[in-house]
Amino acid sequence: MIEAEQADRLLRFFDEMLAFYRSFLAFEREKYEIIVSGDFAKLDESLRQEQAFTLKARGLEGDRVKLLEETDCTQYRFGDLAGEMDPSRSGTMQKLCEEISATLENVRLVNERAAGMTRMKMARVSKTLSEMENHPELKKIYGNKLSESAGPESTFSRKI
């Protein structure tokens, strides 16, 4: 049985973790809309934000492990913690576990959708560039700039 003080620390931590992952989910949804819109400037900024979220998530995971060690709860799986708390706290912990799990699953699904949309848009760009490079009539219209481009690649293509 997890003692009351330890249970309260765990509940506070997992409540903060849930708040973080909810904001991460909101960000992922925003990022998907940016990808759909094709706004590269906003996408570039969102990639920096995503890196910050990823670093924060790693930090939270480290904090979670440390807290479980400090509260002597390393032997319990995340979903089992509620069953080891007194009844006045177990319902809250069970709800937090369910909400965190559901939120993480939603983050994963939105991220997969965004990755699929990005792949689709990149395939379209690649196909268009290939068509332009292989058709003399398009080279007449656009000139030889496509093959002569020695400048740096765009920020977007480097990050993809």
Image (spheres, rainbow, N blue to C red):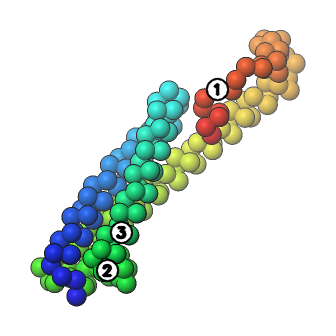
Q: Are marks 3 and 1 in contact (CB under 8 Å)?
A: no
Residue 14 figure quarter: bottom left
Q: Which mark is residue 154?
A: 1
Hey, which residue is sitting farthest left in the picture?
A: 88
Q: Which mark is residue 6?
A: none
Q: Nearer the viewer, residue 85 or 120?
A: 85
Quarter of the picture holding the C terminus: top right
Calculate the distance from the C-alpha at mark 3 to the C-alpha at mark 1: 42 Å
Query: Which x, y percent locates residue 1?
Result: 22, 88
| Disc 3 element | helix
Calculate the distance from the C-alpha at mark 2 to the C-alpha at mark 3: 10 Å
Label 1 amino acid? Ser
Residue 9 figure quarter: bottom left
Provide the residue designation for mark 3: 66
Question: Mark 1 or mark 2: which comes first in sequence?
Answer: 2
Provide the residue designation for mark 2: 73
Hey, which residue is sitting farthest bottom in the picture?
A: 1
